[in-house]
Image (spheres, rainbow, N blue to C red):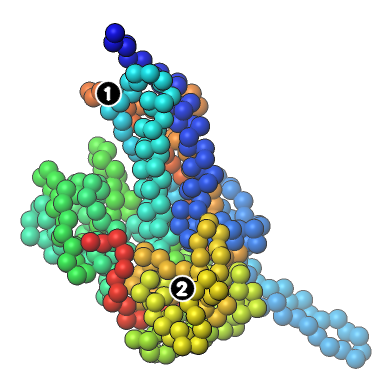
Amino acid sequence: MSVAPVTISSTEIAGLLKNVYSDVRTEIFPRSTPLLANVKKGMAGGPMNLKWGGNGVNGDAVLSRPVGLNASSAGYLSQDAAATEKNFILGIKRLYVTRQIDGLVITGTQSKQAAFLSIIRKVLNEAKAAFELGMQENLHGDGSGVKAVLASSADANHFVASNPYGITGTTLGRGGLLLDIGMYVAVYASNRTTLRGSAVITAISNSGDNITVTLGGSGIASMAANDVVVSASPVSGGDTSLNANTNGLINITNRGNSYTSLHSLDASTAGNARWDAIRLVAGTDVGDANNPTEMDIYDLIMKVAGRSGKNARTTPKEFLLLTTPGLEKKLAESFLGQRRWDMANKIELEGGFEGVNICGVACVSDVWCPRGTVYLVHLPSLVWVDAKDFGQVQFEDSGAWRFMSGRDSFETSFGVYTEFGTANRAAHGSITGYVDTADFGFVV
């Protein structure tokens, strides 16, 4: 005897999804990347004077040393000399992921929950993975949302790109780092104002530092060298992520002195000199560009300590070193003759990650880190703002699942309202310009 199919209502779908995504929110998403997991950890010792004001997040940046000690044999008091503080402002960025389910799979044959639970977990795992990769891009970027820069374009359906994160004049990694099949992207002219158009990526081919991209449909007309690629939303009239990403380490550390302004404070303005990170260049400011050593890291630590007063030699657990797997390997090779690179020399980090002990600081490799770069990050000085936690996008009782007009399908979206920044820019630093040819990572 046949068993009649059992249909699951939208209310039951929403209830199941809520139960499943709750553990994703509390256990998986905050720990999905080593940097994000440890930013969350660092918040316990971070600045406490931030507030959500509707238009943005406000905080105080200390821009001078706390001077004023005076000695007097006659007992005269010292002159007031409070440290200079200025207000900084962070806006809120909105990040989204959408997933769809065909109507056919919302039919069970025995137990409604057993039939649908595995589908729900698949949807959530894909959404989590998309957020994981997206947050890596956000945290390592510069806020512009640029994924790559065009080297050339043969026609409306093809372009060749390189330079992930959009930094021209230097190659920060393989061009396919942030581009893949299925992405809906937009292309802007090099002025980052003129929108060429948008389309979905249907095929890719990676060769060296270049990625050749094939676009679906009619493609995008008039593309040219030095145009930039960003993600987009397939809405009528077009909407893109240009300048809509959170801040990332590139602009927080003022890479190349190209990001003097951060959180509405400009390091080039008189009196704001301490609103800047330490920037060292391998082979010029430290060591040999081909052979990074632990002493290069020591120099970076001392430079940061001198400017900010935050010393990784005295409080190493407050800091994190981030670099590529290739540079982590080279750094390890520089001290393998003196000590073993094993569990005895590793440091446990938040989120189940492990770091190699370099100058007492945990060093974590990250394939999204720009090529040839080592970051020194002071975790308590970072700011992570949650205006809306990871969860489904809906209003009151409108329902999180939407019927797709003209199709036997449903879709749901997840979103985060957030921002990433720092209350003490001087507490971070970087070394750039190392030769890193290993190219470990996801690009194939």
Element type at mark 2: strand
Seen at 55% across and 74% down, the residue is 344
Element type at mark 1: helix
Kindly identify the amino acid type of the residue bearing the numbered disc 2.
Tyr
- Quadrant assignment for the N terminus: top left
Find disc 1 in the rendering and name its residue.
104
Q: Can residue 165 be seen in this view?
A: yes
1 and 2 marks in contact (CB < 8 Å):
no
Find disc 2 in the rendering and name its residue.
375
Q: How far apart are marks 1 and 2 (CA)?
A: 49 Å
Quadrant in the picture for residue 404: top left
Tally of marks: 2
Seen at 72% across and 73% down, the residue is 82
Kindly identify the amino acid type of the residue bearing the numbered disc 1.
Leu
Foreground of the two, 336 or 273: 336
Drawn side of residue 8 relative to residue 48, left or right: left
Q: Residue 284 carries which label?
A: none
The 10 Å Cα crowd at callout 2, few under 14, some 14 to 19, many 20 or more, is many
Q: What percent of the width, then of the height, locates residue 150?
A: 19, 63
Q: What percent of the width, then of the height, locates residue 329?
A: 39, 77
The 10 Å Cα crowd at callout 1, few under 14, some 14 to 19, many 20 or more, is few
- Give the vertical position of 429 relative to 412 (above or below): below
- Give the vertical position of 421 relative to 72 (above or below): above
Quadrant in the picture for residue 245: bottom left
- Quadrant assignment for the C terminus: bottom left
Q: Is residue 413 visible?
A: no
